[in-house]
Image: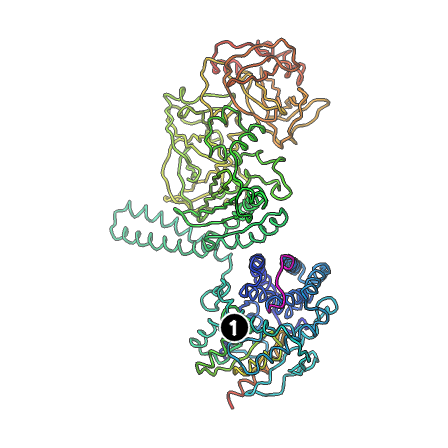
Amino acid sequence: MRVLVVDDSRVMRQIVVRALRQAGFGSLEVVEAGDGEAGITAVADEAPELVLCDWNMPGTSGIEMLERLRASGDRTPFGFVTSEAATEVHDRAAAAGADFVVTKPFTPEVLHEAIEAALAGVAS
Amino acid sequence: MDDGALEGMDEIVAEFLVESEENLDELDQQLVALESDPTSRPLLAAVFRTIHTIKGTSGFLAFSDLERLAHVGETLLARLRDGRAVATPQTVTVLLHMVDAVRGLLGRIEQTGSDAGADLTGVLAEITAELEEGGAPATGGAAEGQAPAAAAPAAEPAPAPAAEPAAGTDEVSPPPAAQAPEPAAADVAAVPAPVEAAAPAPAAQPSGSSPVPKPAPAPAPAAPVAPAAEAAAPAAPTGGEEPVAQRRSGEASVRVDVELLEQLMSMVGELVLTRNQVLERAAAGGDAEMVRAAHRLDLVAGELQQGVMQTRMQPIDHVWSKLPRVVRDLGSQLGRQVRLVMEGADTELDRTLLEAVKDPLTHLVRNAVDHGLEPPEDRRAAGKDPVGLVTLRARHEGGQVLVEVSDDGRGMDPRVIGARALERGIVDEAALRKMSTTEVLGLVFTPGFSTAAAVTSVSGRGVGMDVVRTNIERIGGSIELESVVGRGSTTRLRVPLTLAIIPALVVSCGGQRFAIPQNGLRELVGLDRERSGGATERVGDAEVHRLRGHLLPLVRLHEALALGEPEPGESSVVAVLETAGRRFGLVVDAVLATQEIVVKPLGGLLADLPHYSGATILGDGGLALILDVQALSRSAREQERADEHAGENEVATHDSTQLLLVRVGARRMAIPLDIVTRLEDVPRDRLERIGRRWAVQHRGEVMPVLDLAEHLGELTSGEESVPLVVHAVGGRSVALAVDEILDVAPAATARVSHLGDPGLSGSAVVDEHIVEMLDVRQAVLAADATFYDEADGHGRAGSYVPPRPRSPHDAHQDVRA
């Protein structure tokens, strides 16, 4: 599976990638981006099957990135990985077309379930 | 969360430390900038984000103290970001303390692997107090946090694409600080949002916390902060102008181990050496094809070297980024208002050099704030902006990096510096009179200049400008000072781009080849053996060369390295070298070439050898040791101390008596040069008390030492290194310890005093000033009562004999007879 991980923190990207591996997504191909702008470019260039994105980033934020992707017609499954747990964050994510929001800190199991559900939703 | 949740944590923790450290450096800068622009949204968003990231990550890594601290800090920052409070200088101070505490915890993690055990009560209390002061009560995080929570949906009933509910973060939080050591809410594993498309049941909660995705919004209708919160929303997007934004993009760059870069550099070094050899062979062989191939190799190797060097380059901002904080803290401590401007922060230099300029730069910036800038009221009185300006500039210039530290403060008065130098006995008045303004300013780099009187609690850290200069010169750089009284000062550093490959002069001596780094090289002078009697002469035990009317102390490489006697009759070359503002001549057999050399460190047993800073391989495959100019300069100093000022003054006319001028306590004394056998410097701790006398071990023998200060009832200034004036007759020596060797000067007149001053034999006039003449015989006897019993057989007593026309050479011969 090809996953794009967008986060301005290298460590957080590393944590997400590690959690993905531990969640059992063995044959992972990971593309990383450090902000929303780079993320949008990476979606176009790398055609990932899934985007895991931070909310709060310098420059183009996660929600902006999602809104721009969806506005351009892109439908790549998109999940937020964020420590923003506020309701309106979730609402806004949903409204913009996000498939799920996973709140930090999370466990590999939680990540796994969220992703499985999102991918299943796409498949059906 | 349990430790097993994520494997391979060590690596992640290490990465976390690196990343956090980088972010904290930025944070310091951003917070300082915030002080002058307390409502800047991009700044607030960036500062918030950094702490937010640290909080989020430490949650994963189970650093609960760090998480708690970052959380409280975040709460305060969220309030600023959302416009519910405005940062005061006090707020900034508190936030800086938080950053320091975070640093402390990171250090603790680095050392012990855990953040537990640090005392955070002080800083937590500070932040809490700040939260309470900020108007919005900080009691019960929930109430405080949920006000905007309720407000936000109200302000934004439909998903408005432009706005972002910026107030969000507060809600995640457990109540601030102390009560909640382990923030339970933050531990909630996953809260999948009820999104229309994918609507599976929310994931299981391993921690057992409530899976309810929507915490009931607290009814807090009175939310006057809502507009502010909304207005704050665009902050995050606009934050994109900061450098943070472009820096990390997963695809455009990779991270490489520094170790690997070092290896690459060293291999490129080898390649450059091999290229030099191939070029030489190809040129000699005359095979046109081979020559072409060699030139291609030359080109490619050159570009490869450039490329690899480029990878080791880092912007000077890495060092500068720490300075706003330094300036801020210092400014508030000293009551100075300071604006720090940086130009050319992206100027790159080799990372090893970057490390080397860090301390000198910090010192210069501290000096600028402490000594350069005046207090605001003085500035106002002088018609200046009460806010002082310190400017850092960096740029590439002629293959070097130029770094300037300027202030618009009071400037340096050459008269004051001159007076201080006189007072400290660094120069005498005659020498001072001849100096240009730049030379006078340069006196601040002299060891011993910036001492007690200049020490404040801030800048006087025992590191004077002389150390700054030494450190800059050690890396092949130079330093100069420019100042206009009342307008300010500028210190200019020039450092090489890299240390790995340097231009050097290859010389031969005693059949071996040596490389001299060119940055200290001033000129080359041929020494004609035929005429060498006229061209070199002796002062005490030391050899000097008369160069354009100035005396240049000489070091013979043959002697310094014990290479044996040079071939008689051969001419030699003097390489005029300068280090620490001091010139000396290095006598070698011949100059062979100038060449770019690759510096190889000396390892193992060779590393401790003095006089060498490394080795290199020359074009023909042979080895050459690289001479350490600073070390040679020191050995020049050990050999003779009468150099510095003798070198700067006019050469004495031979028909008058030469005097060695020394400082003893606060007194300037003269000692007839003809009784001086040699001058030495010994570390004070090598002086040993034997009974009521002092002695020093010298070449296996015990030499009595008389402390002249004690002898004359003066207070010694007690430097670490003690200059000794050694008087030897007939195999016996005594040493007179002085505080400083000042000069060698001709005495215009001298007379015996009959006043019976204790310890003195009379006075002499030097440069129109009267100096006291030491009664050498009395002093020598005080050191060794039996000295003359045997020595007198040689017919020379220490008592000063009134001058008679005589060449110093004769005197010298006498003493050595």
* Front position in the image: B573 or A102: A102
Q: Which residues are magenta?
A: B82-91
Please identify the residue farthest to the right as the structure is shown.
B179
Please identify the residue farthest to the bottom as the structure is shown.
A124
In percent of width and height, residue B697 lies at 63, 26
Q: Hey, what amino acid is under mark 1? A: Ser
Q: Is residue B781 above or below residue B739?
A: above
Identify the residue position indicated by label 1 in the image: A61
In percent of width and height, residue B167 lies at 61, 73
> At x 47% / y 13%, what residue is drawn?
B807
* Front position in the image: B269 or A91: A91
Q: Main secondary structure of the magenta part?
A: loop
* Front position in the image: B669 or B755: B755
Q: Secondary structure at mark 1?
A: loop
* Front position in the image: B538 or B69: B69
Residue B320 seen anywhere in this rendered image of the structure: yes
> At x 46% / y 18%, what residue is drawn?
B652
Q: Is residue A115 above or below residue B423?
A: below
Residue B54, by quadrant, is bottom right
